[in-house]
Amino acid sequence: MHKLLLKGGLVVDPAAGEIFPADILIEKGKIAAIGQDLEASEGTVIDVGGRLVSPGLIDMHVHFREPGFEAKETIATGSRAAARGGFTAVACMPNTDPVADNRAVISYIRARAEQAGLIKVYPVAALTRGSRGEELTEMADLKEAGAVAFSDDGRPVSSAAVMRRAMQYARMVGLPVISHCEEPTLSAGGVMHEGYMSTVLGLPGIPAAAEEIMVARDIILSEHTGCPLHIAHVSTAGSVRLIREAKARGVPVTAEVTPHHFTLTDRAVAGYNTSAKVNPPLRTEEDVAALKEALADGTIDVIATDHAPHTVEEKDVEFQLAPFGMVGLETAVGLVWTELVIPGVLSPVEAIRKLTVNPARILGLQDGVIRVGADADITIIDPGLTEVVDPSTFASKGRNSPFSGKKLQGLPVATIVRGRLVYDRGLLAVT
Ligand code: DOR
Ligand code: ZN
């Protein structure tokens, strides 16, 4: 395989917390050297022109819909969307059809990702059969097949007994449990955040308590079982408080927030905009402020998109009937930069840490670092580049973005996986 030299970039080392000017030489898909004035006798040279050279970004929460819902997204289109969004690896959730609750589906997902041949796709296996919340899956078998975590994401595990048993087994197997926190008797029938806006719009609400009760329950179960617990898509100030307190006590809990939850409030639903229908729902100003504070103080470890594509036909219906979910892969970096880095909520290194080393550590991956000998997974980010979001340009099949028309600054311009350029915005000189 041939050589690739990235010249004149600012290398971001999120593990060390540093940004420094250096060239990177890639050979046989691995990082061969990092240093000043590197030369390549053969192969391709990319002039990075002072842009940021980050470890490949990892999105630990996406829905690629295959098998079963290929009209919404396939592993191939999802992989393209990921590459275009600057992601070199994703973890995909098991709410496919059939559910990824057995070895065959996990192997199928990995094979399809291999065929797509763009990015790394790490499957998350279901916690319970059919994600019905009743019987546990064959966890050891699923790990052996390549699963990196267990989750019934998209559906709550309503039984505390089932969740406790799942954590006991997951701990033995050595993989984390990712919890979609939603108390179903409180969320039942709800389509948006319960509050002033839901009253004004006359829509049934999902109270903050529906999330917080389950965050509290799962923290307690994590503490008692010792199982690493990762809270998916945290959306409320109350959840943040519970996670902060649990971490302070040493409970092995981590948490993620999505770009839409740190950017938008329930006001985005005004006009019955189904692009803003998502679960957990968009909350209030106070919640957004608490999520930003939690990002800044480290209570929230990870930024993940919950990329959830749906077809135009499915979303183009009455608000109550539309499915929950929005696409996120192709706007994530721009939203992180525009909403967090430029306003100073996070430094560039801190932001990148939540998109690389932190998700890698939680999932037990070797990815997320720039180090000699590591896979050459790299994202080049131009912090000055701007664009207006236009869903018709997405590589994803999904068009369901509430950010259409929003101006973003700070965008990925090239994505490299195992030394291969899988996305190139066309701004870099390649010779
Ligand atoms: O909005 C959502 N969409 N939330 C989820 O938990 C599931 C996801 C989906 O699969 O569409
Ligand atoms: Zn999800």
Image (cartoon, helix red, strand yellow):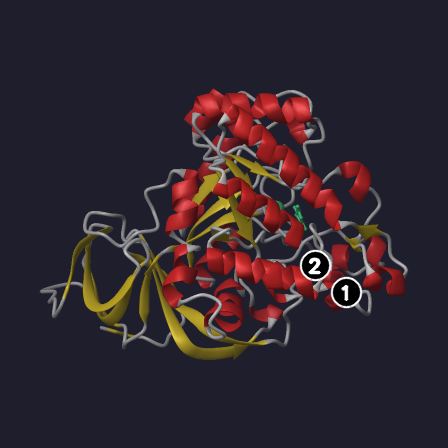
Q: Secondary structure at mark 2?
A: loop
Q: Nearer the viewer, mark 1 or mark 2?
A: 2
The amino acid type, in three-letter code, at marker 1 is Val
Q: Is residue 60 above or below residue 312?
A: above
Q: Is residue 145 above or below residue 33?
A: above
Pick the residue in front: 46 or 228: 228
Q: Position of residue 358 (x, y in %)?
A: 41, 48
Return the residue at label 1: 269
What is the quadrant of residue 267 in the picture?
Answer: bottom right
Q: Is residue 236 left or right of residue 367?
A: right
Q: Residue at x 70, y 39 (%)?
A: 213
Q: Is residue 40 left or right of residue 129?
A: left
Q: In the image, which disc is placed on residue 282?
A: 2
Q: Position of residue 111 (x, y in %)?
A: 45, 37
Do the residues under discs 1 and 2 have CB atoms within 8 angstroms? yes
Pick the residue in front: 252 or 421: 252
